[in-house]
Amino acid sequence: MNTPSKGHVHEWVAAWKKAGRDLQRIRLEEIRTADTRAVIESLDAAFRSALLHYPPVPDSGLVEQQKLFQRLKQ
């Protein structure tokens, strides 16, 4: 593999700076024009399926985690 010259590195950095500005502009435009309602509606079936197949558990597991820590500590 060839080591890039200092000039090539500066060109590469400048290209990524410009790309970063362009990507940020695109990102902000996509956020501004996003149809949040449509996105939420499109994900509704997947969310309901996940709830059906993986119902929420009544606890976070924190109690079990603390019990494990206590056993490890001893």
Image: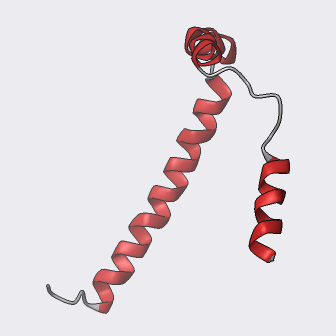
Residue positioned 25% across, 90% down in the render = 5
Image position of 17 with respect to 4: above or below: above
Say which quarter of the image contains residue 25: top right
The residue closer to the viewer here, 22 or 68, is 68
Could you tell whether 4 is left or right of 24 in the image? left
Q: Position of residue 49 (x, y in %)?
A: 57, 12
The residue closer to the viewer here, 56 or 14, is 56
Residue positioned 64% across, 32% down in the render = 31
Residue positioned 75% across, 28% down in the render = 57
Could you tell whether 32 is left or right of 17 in the image? right
* Furthest residue toward left: 1
Image position of 53 with respect to 64: above or below: above
Residue positioned 54% across, 55% down in the render = 21
Q: Position of residue 3 (x, y in %)?
A: 21, 90
Image position of 71 with respect to 67: above or below: below
Q: Position of residue 2 (x, y in %)?
A: 15, 87
Could you tell whether 3 is left or right of 57 in the image? left
Quadrant for the C terminus, please: bottom right
Quadrant for the N terminus, please: bottom left
Image position of 27 with respect to 3: above or below: above
Say which quarter of the image contains residue 12: bottom left
